Amino acid sequence: MQEVRFEAFGELLKYEEPAVATPQGSISSWMTVAGTGLFWSLVLVIVVARAIYFTPDLAGKFWQLEALGRTVRTILGA
């Protein structure tokens, strides 16, 4: 027995039509590989940059944020 499925807005999904048309051809497969490669390259760059510029004393710098808040309150007269 087939299960009845609805989309997020309550419309009945039709089983006869594909929900997403899959592109065919060598260009689309090349674009998929290029996009995937670009995505994972960016992930790698971000992770390496975070590892290089990681500051273990981050919690010790919260006093600067508190001092900035006090300065802003003094300027605004609050």
Image: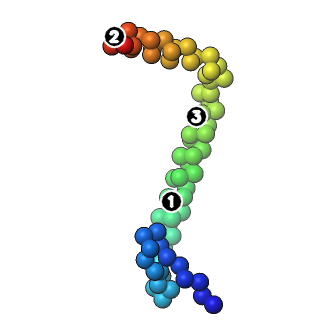
* In the image: residue 48, left or right of residue 11: right
Applied colour scheme = rainbow
Splitting the image into 4 quarters, where does residue 74 fall? Answer: top left
Query: Mark 2: which amino acid?
Result: Gly
Whether residue 49 is situated above or below residue 30 in the rendered picture: above
The span from disc 2 to disc 3 (Cα, nearest Å) is: 40 Å
Q: Find residue 11 and report its image quarter.
A: bottom left
Where does label 1 land, which residue? Answer: 34
* Image spot of residue 30 (x, y percent): 50, 66
Q: Residue 6: image x %, image y %?
A: 49, 76
Q: Is residue 65 at least partly visible in the picture?
A: yes
- The residue where tag 3 is placed is 49
Mark seen at residue 77: 2
Q: Circle 3 — which element?
A: helix
Say which element carries label 2: loop
Q: CA distance from mark 3 to mark 1?
A: 22 Å
Contact between marks 2 and 3 (CB within 8 A): the answer is no
Q: Which residue appears farthest toward the right when viewing the image? A: 56
Identified at 44% across, 74% down, the residue is: 10
Does the CB distance between marks 3 and 1 fall below 8 Å? no
In depth, the one of 59 and 50 nearer the eye is: 59
Residue at horizontal 34 percent and vertical 10 percent from the top: 77
Q: Amino acid at mark 1?
A: Ala
Q: Nearer the viewer, mark 2 or mark 1?
A: 2
Q: Is disc 3 surrounded by few (<14), some (14 to 19) or many (20+) residues within 10 Å?
A: few
Say which label, 2 or 1, has the lower sequence index.
1
The amino acid at mark 3 is Ala
Question: Horizontal placement of 65 versus 47: left or right?
Answer: left
- At a point 57% along the width and 51% down the height, the residue shown is 40
